[in-house]
Structure formats: C-alpha cells, structure tokens
Amino acid sequence: MQDTKERIIELADRLIRTRGFNAFSYKDISDPLEIRNAAIHYYFPSKTDLGIAVINQEIEKLAINKLYWATFPENEQLRLFFDVFYQRSKQGFICLMGSLSPDYETLPAAMQEKVQHMSEDVLEWVTLCLENGRKKQLFHFKGDAYDRALLVVSNMLSSLLLARVMGKEVFEKMSNQLLNDLL
C-alpha cells in the first residue's frame, strides 16, 4: 500500500511541475496508475492534502541534499544546488516552487503556508551558502547575501521557464553566467 501512496505523490509531483497545481485532477492520476479515484482519496482526502504531501517530499529531499552538500566547499555546494535545477531542466520540468508560485493566490491557505515555508527554506540555505562562501573568498559579490540569494533563486526559477520556451541550452547559459558572476 505504501508503494501506491508513493506512486500517487510522484505522479502528482510530475503533474504539478509540468501543468501546475490547478491544471490536474485525481482522474489524471488514477487513469495512468490504473487505480480508482477512491484509492487516491484514501491516502489524500483532498487535493490540498496531496499538494502538501508533494511539498513535504520536496522539503525532505532538500534537507537530505543540504546534509550531503555541507561536506563540500560553498562554491561546490552552489554548483550541486544548480545541478538539481539542471536535472529538472533535462526532464522538461520546472521546480516545484516555480510551478506553485503562479498558482499561489488560488491555493488553499494550508498549501500557501507550505509553499512559503519551502521558499524560505531554500532562500535561507542559499543565503547561508553565499555568506559563508564570501567569508572564505569563494564568492565575490556586493551587497547583502540575502538579496543576492533572491537573485540566485529567481534566476534559477526563470531559467527553467525560459528553457521550456527557448531550449534546454538556455538553462546552462543562465546558470553558468550566474556562477561566473559570483566566483
């Protein structure tokens, strides 16, 4: 039964990253998984519950990645962070935060809180990475690290969107330029 729950979350994640939260229904999950809608409702009584499960999974993945990344110098940590986005680009996906942000005003309050928490978590980590890297002279930039983190994250989000329209090589150009500007 846990396998079914995980498959539901995985497919919902893909649908959110390709269509957006408001553009899929439980039928879009039940048909390809060959299960009844009732099976989805068993695990996730509401679409909000499913959305929160997808966000929680992403937060957990980030926590695991952060532990692994902490074993590297900050410039490598940022490259590894960018690689997560690169992998999404190769799959034709956008990041979860980038996909949920346009729908933010239409999301239920509980999901809005989760999206905000996820966004704050990402920004906090990037800020810390930039601050520590600058102290070690691995990064060179002017201004506040948080302000720079906002630019880094917004560039990563937009690079995935633009790569959808203009081709995957756009992501590489944008992320490489961003790294070069920091190093």
Image (cartoon, rainbow, N blue to C red):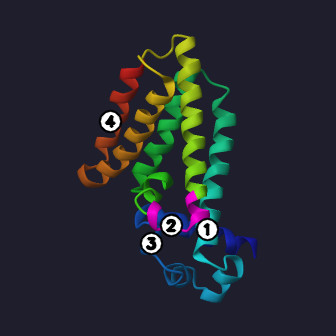
Q: Earlier in the sequence, mark 2 or mark 1?
A: 1
SS under mark 2:
loop
CA distance separating discs 4 and 1:
30 Å
Q: Earlier in the sequence, mark 3 or mark 4?
A: 3
Q: Earlier in the sequence, mark 4 or mark 1?
A: 1
Q: Picture quarter containing residue 19? A: bottom left
SS under mark 4:
helix
Q: Position of residue 16 (x, y in %)?
A: 48, 65
CA distance separating discs 3 and 4:
29 Å
Q: Earlier in the sequence, mark 2 or mark 4?
A: 2
Residue 109 within the magenta-colored segment of the rendering: yes
Q: Earlier in the sequence, mark 3 or mark 1?
A: 1
Q: Which mark is residue 174?
A: 4
Q: Residues within 10 Å of mark 4 (few under 14, many from 20)?
A: some
Position of residue 77 relative to residue 25, above or below, is above
SS under mark 1:
helix
Q: Label 2: which residue?
A: 107
**Type of amino acid under label 2:** Leu
CA distance separating discs 3 and 2:
8 Å
Q: Nearer the viewer, mark 2 or mark 4?
A: 2
Q: Which mark is residue 22?
A: 3
Q: Which residues are magenta?
A: 104-112
Q: Nearer the viewer, mark 2 or mark 1?
A: 2
**Type of amino acid under label 4:** Met
Q: Residues within 10 Å of mark 3 (few under 14, many from 20)?
A: few
